[in-house]
Image (cartoon, rainbow, N blue to C red):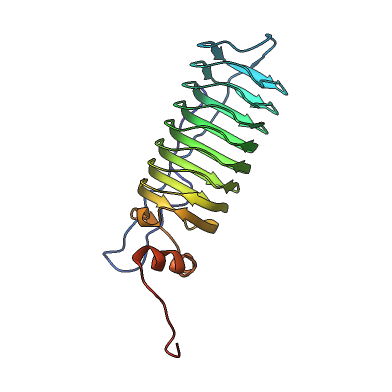
Amino acid sequence: MARRAAAGGGTGRSRGTGAGAAKVRAARRPELRLPPLTPYEDGGLEPDGDYDALEFRETDLSGQDAAGARFMDCALTGCALDGASLPRARLLDSVLTGVRGVGTDLAEATLRDVELHDARLGGTQLHGAVLERVLVRGGKIDYLNLRRSRLKDVVFEGCVLVEPDFGGARLERVAFVDCALRQADLSAAVLTDVDLRGAAPLELSRGVDRLSGAVISPPQLLDLAPVLAAELGLRVVGEEE
């Protein structure tokens, strides 16, 4: 096996002062140790295929149909994923580095003990997916669809997320570290031990009422004041007005 998850991430500090100060549980990050890998040389992926201990390097997987496939102890480096169809796929104990693509379909997929580095993705479909012990580090992902997904022990670090959709999703022990979160949709989401303090900017298009279970910093509270006031129907008017 490639991994063993370890506690860490530096997000478990106490909040506030005094004996009653709340704490947020830190997300557990994956620790991957890949076995010796065999270069992937086959022509294409197959639905329900099994791919173990393989290295996909600069492989064009655009438009490939690998619904229900299983990738274990694999490394995908510099691969093109435009229009790749991977619904219900399982990515286990694997590292993806520098992958790129638009419209990659990973609906209802399972990602467990996975690291995603420096990705350039747009319109990735992960609705209904399960992500556990996943690290997303660097890169930029536009219009990420995570509706009704389940995220547990997930860290977004040093990346840019543009209009991610977490509608109806369940997030537990999720951390945003030095990460830009732009116009995120949290409508109907359920948050538990979600650390948003490292998100800059922190922009919410919908779902500000779902922030219970998250922790933010004092400056972020000031930044969110207008949307919080709008959510409460609160008018802010100066005395001279």
Q: Does residue 166 lie above or below 198 as drawn? A: above
Residue beneath the point at 46% across and 25% down: 109
Residue beneath the point at 44% across and 68% down: 225
Image quadrant holding the C terminus, namely bottom left
Depth order, front residue of 105/17? 105
Q: Does residue 178 lie above or below 131 as drawn? A: below
Q: Residue furthest bottom?
A: 240
Instruction: List x then y, in percent, for residue 84.
Output: 61, 23
- Quarter of image, res 200: bottom right
* Residue 29 shows up from this direction: yes
Depth order, front residue of 86/194? 86
Q: Residue furthest left?
A: 20
Count up the numbered dots. Answer: 0
Residue beneath the point at 49% across and 24% down: 92
Instruction: List x then y, in percent, for residue 160.
Output: 60, 48
Depth order, front residue of 193/107? 107
* Residue 221 shows up from this direction: no
Q: Does residue 189 lie above or below 202 as drawn? A: above
Q: Does residue 226 lie above or below 130 as drawn? A: below
Instruction: List x then y, in percent, for residue 150.
Output: 39, 36
- Quarter of image, res 60: top right
Q: Residue furthest front?
A: 241
Instruction: List x then y, in percent, for residue 197.
Output: 48, 58
